[in-house]
Every structure is written in structure tokens, then in C-alpha cells.
Image (cartoon, grey):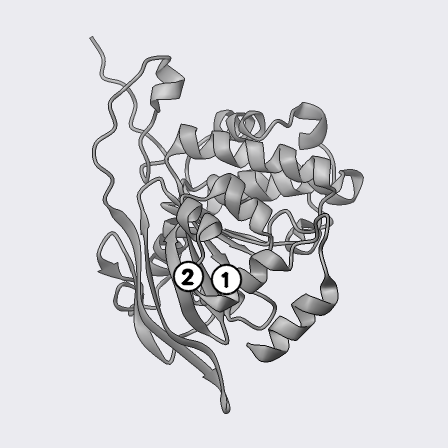
Amino acid sequence: MTSPPPDPYPDSPTESATDLGVARDRPPRGTVLEVVGLRRAYGSVRAVDEVSFTLAEGGSLGIVGESGSGKTTTARIVVGLEHADSGQVRVHAQDRAARGAGRGREQRLRRAREIQMVFQDPFLSLDPRTSVGAVLRDTLRLHFPGTDHARRTAELLDQVGLGTREAAALPRQLSGGQRQRVAIARALAVRPAVLVLDEAVAALDVSVQAQILNLLADLREQTGTAYLFITHDLGVVRCVTDDVIVMRHGRVVESGSTASVLTDPQHPYTRLLLDSVPRPGWDPRRIAEARRAL
């Protein structure tokens, strides 16, 4: 009896309960991401000021706030696109800054496999000269060299609802929703512990937004990847997150379970955000007055 070949993508389990078609009792979830006391200033402006939060394994955390609240800067620090002036970002209790102290190629790739990011505009993050299939194969070759990636590429396309026709297409030949599916597939190719989604559905039509959000919910169930949603859309937060933090002027002003924060907000700024959502009887002048008072 021969032993099965080793998994060429070792950073994640090779199969899920969904793949096996059986139910499994999930163990208690631990903490996959811990952010402690992040600070980032640009001159006299404190873009991020003592921001701390945790994200459970397989969980979904939303960071909400208006433009300039510091939510995107926080996300970029978590991913590693920007450096914090102080504070720590830990994945599975390991400080990413300490882990990345070595500047070798393997250290950088290891950090990239821990946390991946999906941006608002996938057209800007995809090479316009490279087909969808080639984008995924190039990502897999970079992180897992010496392996035939045809099966994994087909699997990723199927996971996000794309097929062979889209695999041969260039980004400009796809719709906005299809391009975002490609971006999600590329991010999931390395089986990250955390997926950061920065306004990932903001540029899409409402009907397409719903499709992508449903896709993300299914993928979280299948893969166990934890999500960090950066958004200004409280509807998105309500649909896809377990917990939420509210940021204003670089600081966290409220946090808790999504249901409790959105149904019984404690901070005046959170109440202002909820009141700002247009609905019957909505009075923009009253909202403007409340904003000035705050």
C-alpha cells in the first residue's frame, strides 16, 4: 500500500468538512489575529491611534468608519503594506514584525501567506496583459515552486464560480464582479489565515455585491479563513461580520458583536453613522446638525 503524496500547499488543511460531505464538530475557536496598540502618524495627524482588536479563527470582523477614520491605514499595517510607529500585529501569537526581521525571500513569502488582501478595484491590482489562469498559476509557482498547479488552478476557479472560458480571458474582458472573483481566488490561492477585504464590494452594482458577499460567506465556511472587512457600508457589516469595531479620527470608539453594536449603539458617533443611512423620513439637515454638534 503506497502512502499518499505530500500536500503541495501545506499552509492549510488539505480538505474541509464540506469537501468530505460530512458534519464535524468544530473545536473552540482560538485567536488568529491580534492587533495591539497600533499607532501611525503623518506629521501632526494621527491616522491610527492606539488601535487594538482580535480576530477569531474562521471569524469575521468589520472595521467601519467614514473616510479619514483610519480604517484603511489600519488594514495596510496589518497586511504589511505600511509600518506602524508602534504596536504589534500578531498571527497565531507570533509578532509579524519580529518574524519578518529577516529580509530574505522566504521570510517575505511566509508573511504573505499569513495574510492576503483584496482591494476595492481589482482592475488596478491585476496585470492587464496576463490571463486569469496565468495570474493564478504565477501566484502558485511563486509560493509553491516545483509543483504542477493545473489542478489547484481549476479548483480555485471553481470555488469562485469561474470556468475555463474566464481562465483564458484578460482582465479587461471580464465584468467587475468577475474580476473581483479572480482577485479573491488569487488571494485564497496560498490558503491564508486571514483575508483582508478593503471596500471589496464598494465598486460593484448592488446585485453583484450580493453575489460576492454570498460567495465570501460560502468560502469562509469551506476554507476556515478569517475575514477582516474594511467598509463604510453598514449593510455589508450587518450581513457578513460576527463582530465590529467603529473608528473615528484614528481611534476605536466602540466595539462588540455586530448585532449588539448595530441594534443598541452606545457611542454618539455610532448612532450618527446609523442615522446617516437614508430611509423613509430621513432628514439630512438633522444629520448635519448632529454631525456639527459631535
What amino acid is labelled 1 in the image? Thr
Residue at image position (66%, 74%) is 289
Residue 81 lies left or right of residue 257; in this view the side is right
Residue 221 lies left or right of residue 240; in this view the side is left
Q: Position of residue 188 (x, y in %)?
A: 47, 40
The CA distance from mark 2 to mark 1 is 7 Å
The residue carrying mark 2 is 266
Residue 211 lies left or right of residue 175; in this view the side is left
Vertical order, 217 against 281 (above or below): above
Residue 24 lies left or right of residue 250; in this view the side is left
Q: Which residue in the rendered view is the most extreme toward the top?
A: 1
What amino acid is labelled 2 in the image? Gln
Q: Quadrant of the C terminus?
A: bottom right
Residue at image position (53%, 40%) is 239
Residue at image position (49%, 24%) is 151
Quarter of the image where one finds residue 4: top left
Vertical order, 87 against 154 (above or below): below
Q: Position of residue 214 (x, y in %)?
A: 56, 32
**Contact check, label 2 and label 1, Cβ < 8 Å:** yes
Q: Quadrant of the N terminus?
A: top left
The answer to whether one can see residue 134 in this image is: no
Q: Secondary structure at mark 1?
A: helix
Residue at image position (37%, 35%) is 224
